[in-house]
Image: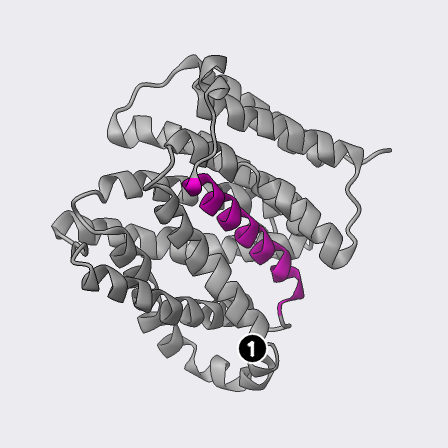
Amino acid sequence: MPPSTTLPQRLWANAYLLLTLTTLMWAGNAVASRMAVGQISPMALTSLRWVFVCSILPLLLRRELKDYAPVLFKHRWLIVALGTFGFTAFNALMYIAGYSTSAINIGILQGSIPVFVLIGAFLAHRARIGWMQALGVGVTMLGILVTASQGDIHILQHFTFVPGDLWMVIACVLYAGYTVGLRSRPAVPGLVFFCAVALVACVVSLPLLGLEIWTGTVVWPTPKGWLILAFVVLGPSLLAQLFFMRAVELIGPGRAGVFVNLVPVFAPLLAVLILGEQLALYHGLALALVLGGIWIAERRPG
């Protein structure tokens, strides 16, 4: 990299830093979800975050959107699919799964995303799955199991499938498809592409909010709820998505997808700092396994 490049340019070219920040924000979103109970309802949080993102970005990027409109229109069905499945459906299905399955099951199943990403990358792009990469995914999956089971093998022995588990598997498949689909995104600036996908997510999420209002379960944000919504808008909904798209662009969906396993490790750590929960020894073991798995997956023979 030329020495004349600026610090922001160097950071924007560092896929591993971008992925670490992405997973930190996604983990923060898990903590925010717990804090949101009684402060803002799930579908209101899902929908309003895209409403706020789309009330800002299109105005700032109106000239760029106009310039790249022909390219975006040419790839309109890919954009619709990514916005619907990656930005809206994944979160909506995860909320639905929470009504009929445990957090342990959701945590275990969410760790399957990298496996689906590797399979999807092979099916869509014939990306080779090397034995080192497969081993790395296996080690990170072990870290997920340690996190979800709290270091107690007996918890895993009682793992059973319920309807919510099926919803979560579908959600993981959809997000893996979103990750793989990013490789085929049109040649437009990342911010322009994100804005187009976010607009789709906003439109798709509105019926979900309407359903929550119709059933009388909506909780409009309290003062604390507004703070939670502000974080979700700026972090998981905006910066994290841009960072993740850029990382996929730099190192590909298979390698980037492995980092998703950091989320259930970072989330407990943030819970200790923000919610005052107790940190256990198994958290350290899980973190070592996940980081070790990522390191193994990044190795190349010779």
Tell me residue 235's x, y (percent). Answer: 37, 51
Q: Residue at x 49, y 80 (%)?
A: 64
- Position in image of residue 222 (x %, y %): 13, 52
Q: Which residue is pictured at 43% across the width and 42% down the height?
A: 163
Within the magenta stretch, is there residue 175? yes
On the question of residue 69 being in view, the answer is yes
Q: Is residue 237 left or right of residue 146?
A: left
Disc 1 residue type? Arg
Using the image, determine if residue 213 lies above or below residue 33: below
Q: Return the x and y of residue 224 as percentages of the image width and height.
A: 16, 47
Residue projecting furthest to the left: 223
Residue 296, picture quadrant: top right
Q: Magenta residues, as a range? A: 163-185
Q: Taking the image as drawn, is residue 6 in sight?
A: no
| Mark 1, residue position | 76
- Give residue 11's position: percent from left, percent from top: 55, 50
Q: Residue furthest toward the right?
A: 302
Task: Confirm whether the magenta stretch covers residue 152.
Answer: no
Residue drawn 38% across and 28% down? 268
